[in-house]
Amino acid sequence: MAPDTIFALASGAGRGAIAVLRMSGPGTQTVLAALAGGVPPARRASLRTLRDTNGDALDRALVLWFPGPGSYTGEDAAELHVHGGPAVIAAVSDAIVTAGGRPAEAGEFTRRAFLNGRMDLLEAEGVNDLVSAETRAQARQALRQMDGELSALHQGWAERLRNLLAHQEALIDFPDEDLPSQVEGMLLAHMLSLRAEIAEHLNDNRRGERLREGLVFAITGTPNVGKSSLMNTLAGRDVAIVSATPGTTRDALEARVVLGGVPVTLVDTAGLRETEDPIEAEGVRRALARAEAADFRVLVEVAGETISGAADLVVANKTDLGGAVPDGALGVSVTTGAGMEDLRARLDAAARALTQAEGPPPLTRARHRAALTEAVAHLDRALEVALPELRGEDLRLAMRALGRVTGAVGVEDLFDVIFRQFCIGK
């Protein structure tokens, strides 16, 4: 069954100077000819009057025609650059439907690109990450994945696994051919080397996933040390209520900021103390849980007082009152701004350290990590078993696990989950 011809608004919703409607599918040429009075030369912008089936003019638009397979989706495709008023967009969309198109589902263009071999699953996920990127660091990571760096790494491992499996099959199929004794030793050595490379790639402290999803920095401490004031200052707005009354913050309050080019959710937690108030006690419990799960913990104390806990960074607040800053702590005054520039620099550095990695592109999703973990487990078993048939089976299973990352095998059940996260028009 031939696929439908789909279309979607590829530019942002709302009123604008220009809106881009994209189409893809076997009927694109027919739809384009009906609206534009003909098909323009391939990959050249042509100014055309768009008309409905009654011949009424809808808009003067730039029309681009991309014959398959040399298009984003690998199918015949087109773009209509129309004026961005809602009435124009609605009229042109209605005309496309009348001519045989249908609205695209979320991620359907990129899904077709994957199914038509224009990109693998890692590259498709990179496209979605780039569209969703909030910071330049996220965009750079997404571009590396979209450009195929992570795919090339996994494909290289898969090729090495295929070679290992071929040698293993030779040992199984030709046991009486007097193959050199060092063949099996070399096979095991190459397996061990590949296993070590994949395991090292997994041991990255989730840097890629942290950058893609954003970090969580928890601000903890006893009541009335200035946690909420610090939170408001870092966020640049009044997120938390500031009061001299202990226990004012009873639930975890959040604010999204950018630190070191990385999206960070700051969490202001309830003051840590013993209390008989059940509501405040629940806030303390939640504060401890958020701090435990956070990527970075900032403990706030008052300068001159004893540090009451452990954290990634200890901040001695209220230095304007004259208290001494303990060893290892960073002295600040939220009231006067003293030390705040140093604090931001420390937080920027922490965010970068948790997400930046040199060398190969990092893993960006839990499903990548799960598949590679499975591949390592099969390689471990292959290295341990004595029977060559069992070793060959574990090598095949390791290849299958790697193939799921790029979409080469066994990912049909993941398609809907992955592509529904895309925006309409991508």
Image: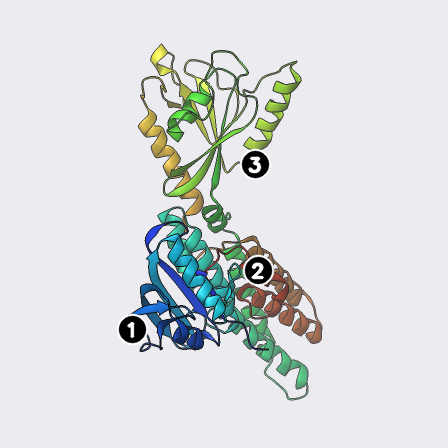
Front residue of 62/425: it is 62
User: Label 2 is placed on what type of residue?
Assistant: Leu
Can you give x and y, in whole percent of width and height, for residue 392 in the image?
66, 74
Q: Secondary structure at mark 3?
A: helix
Kindly identify which residue carries mark 2.
Answer: 372
Q: Earlier in the sequence, mark 3 or mark 2?
A: 3
Q: Secondary structure at mark 1?
A: loop
**Position of residue 42 in the picture relative to residue 7 (left or right):** left
Residue 293: give its label: 3
Q: Is residue 6 visible?
A: no
State which mark lies toward you, 1 or 2.
Answer: 1
- How many residues crowd mark 1 within 10 Å: few (<14), some (14–19), many (20+)? few
Q: Residue at x 44, y 68 (%)?
A: 23
Q: Is residue 60 visible?
A: yes
Q: CA distance from mark 1 to mark 2?
A: 44 Å
Q: CA distance from mark 3 to mark 1?
A: 53 Å
User: Label 3 is placed on what type of residue?
Assistant: Ala
- How many residues crowd mark 3 within 10 Å: few (<14), some (14–19), many (20+)? few
Kindly identify which residue carries mark 1.
Answer: 44
Q: Secondary structure at mark 2?
A: helix
Q: Earlier in the sequence, mark 3 or mark 1?
A: 1
Can you give x and y, in whole percent of width and height, for residue 87 in the image?
39, 55
User: Label 1 is placed on what type of residue?
Assistant: Arg
State which mark lies toward you, 3 or 1.
Answer: 1
State which mark lies toward you, 3 or 2.
Answer: 3
